[in-house]
Image: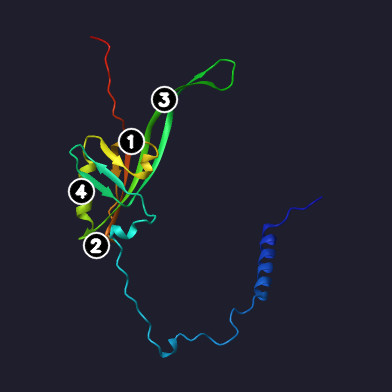
Amino acid sequence: MLSPISISFVAAGAAIQAKGLLYRFKPSRTGQSPDWSNSGMQPVTHELGSPITDKRYWEGRYALCELTLQDEAGERLVMNDAVVAVSRAKNIVTTQLVGRDGTVKEYINAGDYQLNILVGVAAVRDGVIVDEYPEDGLRELRAFLDGNTALQVHSAFLDIFDINRVVIKSYSLTQDTASNYQSLTISAISDEEYTIYGTDY
């Protein structure tokens, strides 16, 4: 007949084994201690380079995909720091049948594209990034987002999905007071122009 193991005995045994492992450790350094005096030399400093904001520098280079918005008045806003996530669900009607597993699927149509756009706004003056909060850029972007009409949209990424028109559902941002950069998230859905014809006269 086996006797139950004492919890205190197991804990004590593990402690003794760990103590034995500590005995096997060797010092990490056996030679002379390092010299932190830099041998009397002064540290060398370098000036930080300015961000490259000239668009011509990026010609022929891989960079972020530009996203352009245009309202009904023809005003355009180009965002060169925008990352878009696209999803789409199909509208399918399912019918359960008695005595059978699963359902009968009746395909209706494809739903709207759901877009989640992450935008970064930097403070820029005369084509150069400056150390200020991007208040002007946010005001300009808000004018587009607060409109109650669909917006024309263009980017190489969205062209893949034939998305050229969107409706803004919502946007959100948390104030960043530690830099000259502000990020915000935009939620939108795709929209298509269509004409409805009536048969009742």
Q: Of the residues under marks 2 and 1, which one precedes in the sequence? A: 2
Q: CA distance from mark 1 to mark 3?
A: 16 Å
Q: Tell me which label, 1 or 3, sits earlier in the chain.
A: 3
> In this rendering, is residue 184 above or below 45?
above
Q: Which residue is mark 2?
A: 128
Q: Residues within 10 Å of mark 3 (few under 14, many from 20)?
A: few
Q: Which mark is residue 109?
A: 3
Give the CA separation, mark 2 to mark 1: 33 Å
Question: Which amino acid type is shown beneath numbered disc 4?
Answer: Glu
Judge depth for marks 2 and 1 and give the one in front.
2
Q: Position of residue 111 (x, y in %)?
A: 39, 29
Q: Which mark is residue 164?
A: none
Kind of residue indicated by mark 3: Asn
Residue lying at the far left of the rendered structure = 73
Give the residue displayed 54% in from the left and 16% down from the top.
Answer: 97
Q: Secondary structure at mark 1?
A: strand
Label 4 close to label 1 by CB (< 8 Å):
no
Is residue 176 among the parts visible in the rendering?
A: no
Give the labeled residue for mark 1: 189
Q: Residue furthest top?
A: 201
Tell me which label, 4 or 2, sits earlier in the chain.
Answer: 2
Mark-to-mark CA distance, 4 and 3: 37 Å
Q: Vertical placement of 147 versus 92: above or below?
A: below
Q: Position of residue 180 (x, y in %)?
A: 26, 60
Q: Nearer the viewer, mark 4 or mark 2?
A: 2
Label 4–label 2 contact, CB within 8 A: no
The circle on residue 140 is 4
Residue 148 vs residue 12, the one in the foreground: 148
Disc 2, disc 3: CB below 8 Å? Answer: no
